Amino acid sequence: MHQGGRPPQPAADSTEHAVESVTRSLRWLDRSDAGQDARALAACLKDVLLLVDPDNVLLQLSSGDGERGHWKSWIPEVSAYEPEPKATVKEPQESPAPAPTETPSATPAPIIPRRSEIRAVVWQRQASNGVTRWLLQPADVRLDASRLPPASNAPSLTIISTAASAAYAETLRSITAPAFRKHGPTLAGWGFRISSKALEDSLVCGKAQFPEAALAVLTASALNGNQTDAIVLGRFDEQGGFRQAPLMWDQLRALGKANRQRLILPTDTEELVLSWLAWEKPEFFIHYEVMLASNLDEACRFAAEQPDEPSAAALKAFEQFCTDAMGRNLRTFIALSKVKRGLGEIVRQLPHHLSAKALLLQANNKRPILLHRLALCSELRRITEPMEWITGLEDPLKIPADRPKIGDVHDECRRNLDALEPYVSKQDDALLSASRTLDALRALDRAIAIKSRDDLAERLPRIQKAKDEFTTAHRTLIKLMRSAEPEAFR
């Protein structure tokens, strides 16, 4: 080196050069401060160097007997570094063309039930003492499905076929059309018929009809392959929202008693329906298992004969609650701590379950105490209906033989109004107007009944004045009730 020379270097492709290069790395990896992984790699490198340079005494001393590195868990087997055999390329052979397969439709064809039913509220004729009246009552509506002849591709829909239903059929077609559009080609070859004897009969009365929501749920459920088991009250708006229908309290009143019938109502009817609690009739929520829905999908879900998995547990728990409550005082039963916890759990699992929620409000003394305005006006219409014919009397002294006495009409109406007063604010304008109308009716009855020495010519002005005052009071009452629900007076 003093002479400017360098020691001989091993050739770059020689074993000595490779060993020297690895040894330099090994010195650093084998230091105590290099870390655990570095020292593990150093141990493996020593094993490799011993294979390459078995005469290296230093490596023999540091390695000891056998392998030093953790090969099995840290380094792949030697076979992993071997070159993969080349795949043999086979000459393509002609093969028969595969049989054509049918492309599945986007929407699988549902298993459509041949017959489905649902309950709605319709007008039904009742005759009493020769007088015909139209009253709201629940009725069944049916959807029958059948296969069409092979030549028929497009689905067909037949709607109740009486002459009176011809115009109404178009309304029903527009209501059921979305369900048919949704399934489209999957309904090819099917024919459907909506029928209801009660609905057919009701169409001749000329009154507003309310079964549209029930028919929409019935059709959508059937086309999805589901049976329904419920009463559906309400209407669907143009955006598909489920909304309160006209005369909703009248429809609820028309239901009567039932044995835990499922009742599907719009969410915006909650306050109105809770008037049954204000009216001290919590039993309604056991007779009817009330569920609230905001759209068609929810209404179909809750109206299904077989509930879906999320709802099944809560519905089963409420069924058990009704069984346990049978034959017991309802108010006492729901006051039990265990029962209240059970009702609370049903509401937690299924917030749409209004029956459980209402009974829990009753149990916790949080029920409403006043009737909803729509319920109040509906009850006032019912209470004051017997006096309507009196407003049309031209001569109060000439009462038809088939009519009751004015005094008897007053007594009946006053008795029913007094029974309603505890559930209404004393300052309610409709209640005060009804009371003033009855006072005017009493004054008319007394004016007619008083027989003095005055001749008839002198009595008539007093009678006519009393009649005019009654008519004015009655007109004011009608105006207040019409403002709450105009549909009731059409």
Image: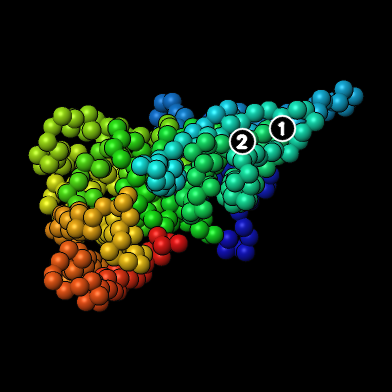
- Please identify the quarter of the rendering in which residue 278 is found: bottom left
Is residue 408 rendered to the left or right of residue 1?
left
Is residue 27 rendered to the left or right of residue 375?
right
Label for residue 193? 2
| Quadrant location of the N terminus in the rendered image | bottom right
Who's the residue at 30% across and 71% down the image?
471
Please name the residue that numbered disc 1 is placed on.
189
Q: Is residue 268 visible?
A: yes
User: Considering the numbered disc 2 on the image, is that residue within a helix, a strand or a loop?
Assistant: strand
Percent coordinates x, y for residue 358 in the rendering: 23, 48
User: Considering the numbered disc 1 on the image, is that residue within a helix, a strand or a loop?
Assistant: loop
Number of marks drawn:
2
Instruction: Name the residue type under label 2.
Output: Arg
Who's the residue at 19% across and 39% down the image?
342
Who's the residue at 23% across and 71% down the image?
456
Mark 2–mark 1 Cα distance, whole angstroms, equals 14 Å
Who's the residue at 29% across and 65% down the image?
396
The residue lying toward the viewer, choosing from 203 and 328, is 203
Mark 1: few/some/many CA within 10 Å (<14, 14-19, 20+): some
| Quadrant location of the C terminus in the rendered image | bottom left
Q: Disc 2 vs disc 1: which is toward the camera?
A: 2
Instruction: Name the residue type under label 1.
Output: Gly
Assess whether mark 1 and mark 2 are in contact (beta carbons under 8 angstroms). no
The residue lying toward the viewer, choosing from 225 and 425, is 425
Is residue 344 rendered to the left or right of residue 117?
left
Mark 2: few/some/many CA within 10 Å (<14, 14-19, 20+): some
Percent coordinates x, y for residue 376 in the rendering: 26, 60
Q: Is residue 83 above or below residue 426?
A: above
Q: Is residue 477 visible?
A: no
The residue lying toward the viewer, choosing from 318 and 144, is 144
Percent coordinates x, y for residue 369 in the rendering: 16, 58
